[in-house]
Image (spheres, rainbow, N blue to C red):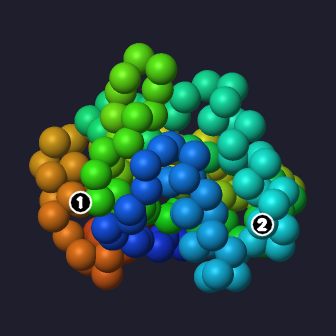
Amino acid sequence: MGVKIDFLSISNINVNTKEEAILQLVNILGKADYLADKSLFEQAILERERTLSTYIGHEIGLPHAQSSGVKEPCVVVGKLSKPVKWTEEEEFVQIVFLIAVPRDNQNNLHLKVLSNLARLLMHEDFRTKLSELDDTATVALLNKSVKEDN
């Protein structure tokens, strides 16, 4: 990808709505010091999700936003304890990849990350492996797979 991006992974997130899932992952980014302004990033990611759903099938959501509230690019993977309704069409999500990229990023990093993740997630074996791994192994798999995909 040409630019470094970090991955975090958290399992067994207990939420009831898409918004709760997104906000919980934003909180994780804030606690891990990836955000300069948490409320600014929350606003950007929720607005982006309202504009167009980030559901991609297979119980996976890819909410993403560029925001001046982000200090360093990061993807946090949230594995929910139960699927939550993601769209008005009754599509449910159990794994969320929340992508946070600084607003001033000039090389379209968020688009590169989105396309790489979408390409990887098309493969059933990758999705199966991802759902079975613990958080440390999930981060290792994503670091390896995203680098190999370039």
For label 1, the SS is helix
Quarter of the figure that contains the C terminus: bottom left
Mark 2 or 1: the one toward you? 2
Mark 1 — residue?
130
Residue 61 location (% of width, % of height): 44, 42
> What residue do we see at 62% from left, 82% from top?
32
Amino acid of disc 2? Lys
Label 1 sits on what residue type?
Leu
Residue in the picture at 35% in, 51% down: 95
Task: Check disc 2: other Cα within 10 Å, few if <14, some if 14-19, many if 20+.
Answer: many
The answer to whether 2 appears left or right of 33 in the picture is left
Quarter holding the N terminus is bottom right
The answer, for residue 86, to whether it is visible in the render is yes
Q: In this rendering, is residue 90 above or below 137?
A: above
The residue carrying pointer 1 sits among few (fewer than 14), some (14 to 19) or many (20 or more) residues within 10 Å by Cα, namely: some
> Residue 7 appears at what percent x and percent y?
48, 70
Q: Earlier in the sequence, mark 2 or mark 1?
A: 2
Q: Which mark is residue 22?
A: none
Q: Find out whether the residues at labels 2 and 1 contact each other: C-beta distance under 8 Å.
A: no
Quarter of the image where one finds residue 92: top left
Q: Is residue 148 visible?
A: no
Q: Of residues 120 and 22, which is closer to you in this image?
A: 22
- Of residues 74 and 25, the one nearer the viewer is 25
Question: Which is nearer the eye, 76 or 18?
Answer: 18
Position of 35 compared to 60: left or right?
A: right
Marks 2 and 1, how far apart in space?
Answer: 28 Å
Task: Where is residue 123? Give x, y as percent.
Answer: 21, 41
- Return the x and y of residue 134 as percentages of the image width and height: 24, 75
Q: Residue drawn at (20%, 70%), measured in percent from left and top? A: 133
- In the image, which disc is placed on residue 38? 2
